[in-house]
Image (tube, coloured by chain):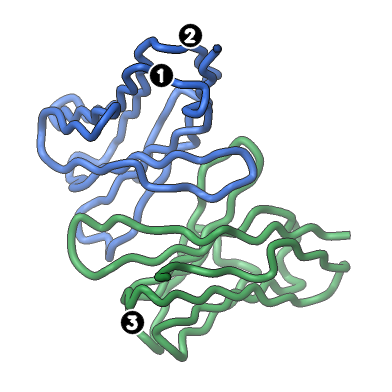
Chain colours: A green, B blue
Amino acid sequence: DGGITQSPKYLFRKEGQNVTLSCEQNLNHDAMYWYRQDPGQGLRLIYYSQIVNDFQKGDIAEGYSVSREKKESFPLTVTSAQKNPTAFYLCASSIGGPPGEQFFGPGTRLTVL
Amino acid sequence: QKEVEQNSGPLSVPEGAIASLNCTYSDRGSQSFFWYRQYSGKSPELIMFIYSNGDKEDGRFTAQLNKASQYVSLLIRDSQPSDSATYLCAVKGPGSARQLTFGSGTQLTVLP
């Protein structure tokens, strides 16, 4: 089955730790995205990548880092510099060209202890 | 700065009624418009998209776009309790490298 997988589903981080969230897709999509969602709010873009080995900052990139070494994979690292990382993290992908619809993975819920 | 605005709700409708969800956007150059449904604790799922003025129907869902008024809406006919969710409006602007800007969502409750 084609789709987007994210792991882990739940993640707990201690203060000062870096953690990495996994996102894999087998849809052969060129573009991949990371969003953060806080309770009662919409999605805010952290990073996005249109092609392998290239990525751009979104609206709230501070305290996060990404890599895109393979078309299928777009991991997100939440660093200790991110002061309020507790949130629901969503990975999405899209095929090239219009209209630009994005498809989402199941999400990772990160909690700072 | 691009903005997408939705009434946060909650919006309650009785089962079988028409639910109307609204979204306005600030970037006149926006090209495509998307509606996502998000159940509590789950990720968003795409319901439908529209990019031409007018109506687009898909089953019980109708998206309506008015670019002159910078307004897009989603109508849900014969609403069911299973339609209870948060509905997110998303907009793709011109030359935005396939990025979407999301509204904060409208929470819909369909009462049995």
> Distance between the Cα atoms at labels 1 and 3?
41 Å
Is the Cβ of the residue at disc 2 closer than 8 Å to that at disc 3? no
Name the image quarter holding residue B22.
Answer: top left
Is the Cβ of the residue at disc 1 closer than 8 Å to that at disc 2? yes
Name the image quarter holding residue A11.
Answer: bottom right
Tell me: B39 left or right of B96: right
Residue A80 vertical placement versus B77 (above, below): below
Residue B5, image x, y percentages: 40, 31
Name the image quarter holding residue B16.
Answer: top left
The residue drawn where x is 37% and y is 47% is B46
The disc label shown at residue A51, or none: 3
Residue placed under numbered mark 1 in the picture: B79
The extreme front residue here reads A1
The disc label shown at residue B90, or none: none
Within 10 Å of disc 2 (Cα), the crowding (few <14, some 14-19, many 20+) is: some
Residue A25 vertical placement versus B96 (above, below): below
Q: Under tag 2, what secondary structure? A: strand
Give the amino acid at mark 2: Pro
Q: Under tag 1, what secondary structure? A: loop
Residue placed under numbered mark 2 in the picture: B14
Give the amino acid at mark 3: Ile
Within 10 Å of disc 3 (Cα), the crowding (few <14, some 14-19, many 20+) is: some
